[in-house]
């Protein structure tokens, strides 16, 4: 019993693993790391640009929540896809469990064609979609330009999602974003001037 307590005491840090969309280069990784260094006490930060795997440790007594981590990733300009938190006491929290809980309350699937060309477009489109209250998940495919999303029809609608994406500068199906919103996009995201093939 004493030995068990001793082992737990040694492991006084929570381990966070987040799948992040939109990391395209070392500069992206640097920006994400810099944003998370605002959390005092963070340790062992590792970021795999290829896979989007982001991992770090944080003092257990600070009780950092998944919501705080998700918001910090979004503040850095990226989209958190999934996350797993292994608490110092051995408890594991996952985004999959949270989504399963949300979907059991009644969720529908929506689909829209959204124009874009790169990973940064993907991050922006999914972030705009997830900004709508009632939307629980979003995935935009670069090749097909198809956005699929899960939402609670009592709180959200496809029209609300479409309007949020248009405001972010991306054309949706037969509606165009304003020139002002489009021109505000980074040069690599100017899909109207680029051909995918």
Image: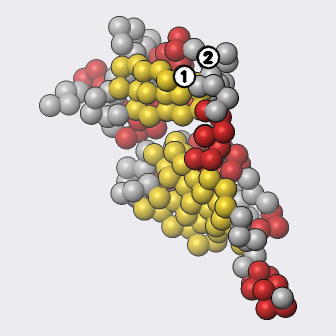
Residue at the spot x=51%, y=67% of the render? Answer: 46
Query: Can residue 15 be seen in the rendering of this structure?
Result: yes
Tell me residue 98's x, y (percent).
65, 43
Question: Which circle marks residue 108 in the picture?
Answer: 1
| Residue 27 occupies quadrant | bottom left
Furthest residue toward left: 197
Q: Secondary structure at mark 2?
A: loop
Furthest residue toward right: 2
Foreground residue, 97 or 57?
97
Foreground residue, 139 or 29?
139
Tell me residue 130's x, y (percent).
57, 30
Task: Establish if 133 lies above or below 180.
Answer: below
Residue at the spot x=32%, y=34% of the render? Answer: 142
- Of the numbered discs 1 and 2, the one sitting upstream in the chain is 1
Q: Secondary structure at mark 1?
A: strand
Question: Which circle marks residue 153 in the picture?
Answer: 2
Furthest residue toward top: 174
Foreground residue, 118 or 148?
148
Distance in Å between CA atoms under marks 1 and 2: 7 Å
Residue at the spot x=84%, y=88% of the render? Answer: 1
| 134 sits to left or right of 45 | right
Query: Can residue 183 be seen in the rendering of this structure?
Result: no
Tell me residue 108's x, y (percent).
54, 22
| Residue 26 occupies quadrant | bottom left
Q: Which of the image's four quarters has the C terminus?
A: top left
Find out whether the residues at labels 1 and 2 contact each other: C-beta distance under 8 Å. yes
Indicate how the structure is coloured in the image: secondary structure
Q: Residues within 10 Å of mark 2 (few under 14, many from 20)?
A: some
């Amino acid at each position: 019993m004493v030995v068990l307590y001793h082992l737990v005491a040694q492991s006084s840090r929570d381990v966070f693993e987040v799948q992040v969309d939109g990391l395209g280069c070392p500069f992206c990784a640097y920006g994400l790391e810099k944003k998370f260094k605002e959390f005092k006490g963070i340790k062992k930060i590792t970021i795999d640009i290829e896979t989007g795997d982001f991992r770090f440790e944080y003092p257990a007594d600070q009780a950092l929540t998944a919501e705080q981590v998700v918001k910090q990733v979004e503040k850095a300009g990226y989209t958190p896809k999934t996350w797993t938190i292994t608490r110092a006491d051995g408890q594991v929290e996952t985004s999959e469990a949270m989504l399963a809980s949300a979907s059991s309350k009644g969720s529908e699937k929506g689909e829209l064609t959204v124009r874009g060309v790169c990973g940064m477009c993907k991050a922006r489109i999914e972030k705009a979609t997830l900004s709508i209250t009632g939307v629980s998940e979003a995935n935009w495919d670069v090749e097909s330009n198809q956005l699929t999303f899960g939402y609670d029809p009592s709180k959200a609608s496809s029209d609300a999602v479409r309007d949020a994406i248009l405001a972010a500068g991306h054309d949706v199906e037969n509606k165009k974003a304003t020139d002002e919103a489009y021109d505000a996009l980074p040069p690599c995201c100017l899909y109207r001037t680029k051909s995918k093939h």
